[in-house]
Image (spheres, rainbow, N blue to C red):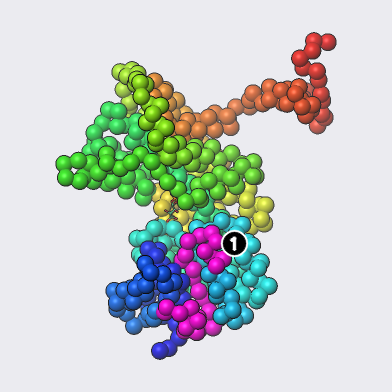
Amino acid sequence: MAKSIFGIIGLGVMGRSLAKNIIHKGFTLSVYNRITPKEKYVVSDFLKKVNNNNIQGFLNLKDFVSSLTQPRKILLMVKSGTVVDTVIDQLKPLLAPGDIIIDGGNSHYQDTQRRVKALEKEQLHFLGVGISGGEEGALKGPSIMAGGSSEQYELVQPIFEAIAAKDKNGDACAAFLGTDGCGHFVKTIHNGIEYAEMQLLAECYSLLSSKYSYPEISEIFSTWNEGALNSYLLSITSKILIKKEGEDYLLDKVLDQAGNKGTGSWSSQTAFQLGVPASMINAAVTARYISALKEKRAQLSKGISKNETGSSINVSTLKKAYTFARIINHHQGFEIIRAVAKANQWNINFSELARIWTQGCIIKSQFMESLVDVFKSEQSILENADFFSQLEQFESSVAQTLQYSLLNRIPMSCFSNSYSYFVSMTTDRLSANLIQAQRDEFGAHTYQRADQPNQSFTSKWTVNE
Ligand code: 6PG
């Protein structure tokens, strides 16, 4: 059989969907999956199912590698972490100089940086590529965020652009964003924004559930979805709410305990490392951790009574608060990207990044669509006059929403963090003068004065001289 121009290792959900997408676009493809007792028939079953002449499957890595045209282009769709290193080690002796390994998983960008360097020494290339859109996106058109070397990217660009989602102008939602770990880093922050977007919807659901039925909340969300708030996550949430199992809503049977695979906390860790406020992502990650403490929560909740205040929720107030919080969430996410890009000398085009997030990915939305233009003229979301004026206008709606949530014991930490962030960022004089004084008192860390700039002072704060 003729050689294939592209290879995929790993036929999990994402690998299988991408493989189908690639052959449906007319490219020739070789696939390989490890053989374990559980995965013995993965390749043969898949070949039977797709029944397509563009694809050949292998159970032997050497044969798989030999079936590819050179330079070989091999996409790894395996679990991120040590598995990626194991597969690279297995592949290395079989490859030739110039071959390209592409990691399509949710890898940590610093792992990708390490792998790029290590493989360079062996004259092999490594592209770290974030792929978003879940199973359906992978099959019908994902958003593809590539990092590595632009020359190597050019060799896979026609395939990536053919399989990617298309934006409103018909251009592929695939782009080369920067060197080494840039693609994986950007995908991590995509997920961080995704975490906070999901948490905001969970908080809206929680608040609305105190007064409205699931079909009513679903209706509220789908009405919001018809306008500027339109997003993939809002759309699926409005459908999830009314999914029934027999007479009951399926959602009521789902355990209130959410897991995670790490990209949310990586976003927060990275933001903390560089001193970037990412309070909404932090809150969303923390909310998942708290949700996981189910047993403890059940135990501590005994005997706690809910103060029903009788005050009501105004849906249009919540809508404004949600609009406000989403602006802050995106602002914080893009600011982490700005700081990390600077530290790594990645020249990321924000407008282009927003563009490839308008379709295919989990955070695609009408808001993202507007960011494509905003970033053509403005550096940051808060610099945009329209968004800033929405924040000013809707601030009181967030306050009212939070007031209701506090009086009714409904945790809304993501909303609350969006509010504190905006209020703090628009307050000239914060309370950090006291923090300076405390640090100086117990640790002689010195402090700066507003009336005598660029000098350090120290005082005996607790002694009256
Ligand atoms: C995507 C998703 C995808 C996955 C995340 C979820 O862009 O397609 O983000 O990558 O759903 O890994 O992460 P958690 O399992 O941590 O929620």
In magenta, the rendered stretch is 58-86
Q: Can the viewer see residue 52?
A: yes
Could you tell me how many numbered marks the image carries?
1
Image quarter (top left, top right, bottom left or bottom right) of the N terminus: bottom left
Does residue 318 appear to the left or right of 65 in the view shown? Answer: left
Identify which residue is drawn at 35% across, 39% down: 256
Check disc 1 and report the residue beneath it: 112
Whether residue 153 is visible: no
The picture places residue 67, in percent across and down from the top left corner, at 47, 84
Q: Please state if 366 lies on the left or on the right of 267 as rendered.
A: left
Residue at 25% over, 37% down: 214
Closer to the camera in the image, 240 or 353: 240
**Label 1, ligand 1: CB separation under 8 Å:** no
Question: Helix, strand, or loop for circle 1?
Answer: helix
Question: Looking at the figure, which quarter contains the C terminus?
Answer: top right
Query: Looking at the picture, how far across and down is residue 96, in whole percent?
Result: 59, 81
Q: Percent position (x, y) of residue 52? A: 32, 79
Q: Quadrant of residue 138?
A: bottom left
In the rendered image of this protein, does residue 294 appear above or below residue 396?
below
User: Residue lying farthest left?
Assistant: 247
Q: Residue at x 50, y 84 (%)?
A: 66
